[in-house]
């Protein structure tokens, strides 16, 4: 990452949280590989996913993260895409839990039709 970006990031209120997970970032990059490069996602990597998947993004988040969520939801065969009002990249646990509960209930109802 360019030094001028790091200097700006150190001024952010999120810097201490980033430092706390710094030791995991290399692993994130290795697992995510080229999917974080801005290139189109490889369609064949996602085609075998068969479980219902909820892809979420905060309406206030950076456009490139929103684009990534939309691209992933477009490739997952069983994905639902949900924007979260009032959220950015991070979402409050209560908001996340409620969205997951509603998604689970909707999926349960869809698969258990009498």
Image (cartoon, rainbow, N blue to C red):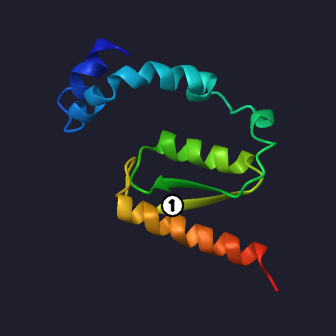
**Helix, strand, or loop for circle 1?**
strand
Q: Position of residue 33 (x, y in %)?
A: 60, 22
| Quadrant occupied by the N terminus | top left
Q: Position of residue 74 (x, y in %)?
A: 71, 49
Residue drawn at the location 29% of the way across and 13% of the way down = 3
In the rendered structure, the answer to whether residue 80 lies left or right of residue 96 reads: right
In the rendered structure, the answer to whether residue 75 lies left or right of residue 55 reads: right
Q: Position of residue 79 (x, y in %)?
A: 69, 56
Q: Residue 53 or 63: which is nearer the viewer? A: 53
Residue drawn at the location 77% of the way across and 77% of the way down = 112
Above-or-below relation of 33 to 42 = above
Above-or-below relation of 101 to 79 = below
User: Residue 35's quadrant in the figure?
Assistant: top right
Above-or-below relation of 92 to 106 = above
| Quadrant occupied by the C terminus | bottom right
Residue found at the far bottom of this picture: 114
Q: Position of residue 100 (x, y in %)?
A: 53, 64
The residue beneath circle 1 is: 83
Question: Does residue 10 show up?
Answer: yes
Q: Residue 45 or 61: which is nearer the viewer? A: 45
Above-or-below relation of 78 to 94 = above
Residue drawn at the location 73% of the way across and 54% of the way down = 51
User: Residue 31's quadrant in the figure?
Assistant: top right
Residue drawn at the location 41% of the way across and 24% of the way down = 24
Question: Does residue 85 show up?
Answer: no
Query: Neighbour class for label 1 at 10 Å: few (<14), some, many (≥20)?
Result: some
């Amino acid at each position: 990452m360019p030094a001028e970006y790091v200097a700006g990031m150190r001024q952010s209120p999120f810097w201490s949280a980033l430092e706390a997970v710094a030791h995991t970032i290399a692993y994130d990059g290795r697992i995510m590989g080229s999917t974080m490069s801005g290139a189109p996602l490889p369609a064949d990597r996602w085609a075998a996913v068969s479980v219902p998947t909820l892809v979420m993004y905060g309406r206030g988040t950076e456009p490139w993260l929103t684009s990534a969520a939309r691209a992933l939801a477009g490739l997952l065969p069983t994905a639902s895409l949900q924007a979260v009002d009032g959220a950015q990249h991070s979402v409050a646990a209560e908001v996340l839990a409620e969205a997951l509960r509603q998604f689970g209930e909707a999926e349960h109802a869809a698969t258990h039709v009498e």
